Amino acid sequence: MKSLKGHYILDGEGNPVIENDSLKWAQWFAVADPTICLQSSVDGAVISTVFLGLDHNFHDHGPPVLFETMVFNGNHDGYCRRYSTQQEAMDGHAEIVAMVGAL
C-alpha cells in the first residue's frame, strides 16, 4: 500500500489538477470551498458527493481517486463509493440516489 500521492485542486472547468505546493492547495481549498459537488435528500437520507482534494488511490497503479459519494442516515447510512473523475462522481451520485430511493 502506498501513501497519498498528492494534493489536487479544480481548474475553472471543474477538472482536477495536481498542486504540489501544500500552502497554495490549502489557500485554494479554503477560498474555493469545492467540497460539495452534489447533495440530494431521499426519504430522510442525505447523499453527498464531494471533491476530496487528496488522492485516495492507495495502489501503485491507476488514476487518482479524488471524489466520494457518501450516504448519511437511513438504511444505507455510511455507504461510500469513490471515483477518479467528476463525471464518474456525478453518475455514481445518481446511481446511489436511485439505490436509496428504491427501498
Image: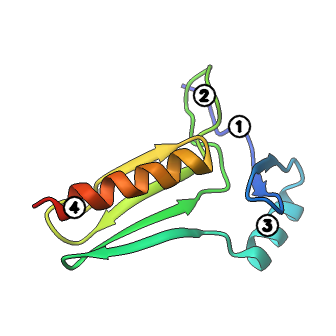
CB contact under 8 Å: marks 2 and 4: no
Q: Specify the amino acid type for callout 1.
A: Lys
How many marks the image carries: the answer is 4
Q: Which residue is mark 3?
A: 26
Q: Which residue is mark 4?
A: 100
Q: Specify the amino acid type for callout 3.
A: Ala
Q: What is the spatial separation of the Cα atoms under label 2 and label 3, in whole angstroms?
A: 22 Å
Q: What is the spatial separation of the Cα atoms under label 1 and label 3, in whole angstroms?
A: 16 Å
Residue at horizontal 79%, vertical 59%?
Answer: 13
Horizontally, is 97 left or right of 6 in the view?
left
Tell me the number on the disc at residue 5: 1
Say which label, 2 or 3, has the lower sequence index.
2
Q: Which percent across, then down, holds residue 79?
A: 28, 54
- Provide the secondary structure element on which disc 4 rests: helix
Instruction: Name the residue at the top extreme.
Output: 61
Q: Which residue is mark 2?
A: 2
- Provide the secondary structure element on which disc 3 rests: helix
Say which label, 1 or 3, has the lower sequence index.
1
Residue at horizontal 69%, vertical 75%?
Answer: 33
Q: Specify the amino acid type for callout 4.
A: Val
Q: What is the spatial separation of the Cα atoms under label 4 and label 3, in whole angstroms?
A: 34 Å
Task: Classify the position of the N terminus by image quarter.
Answer: top right
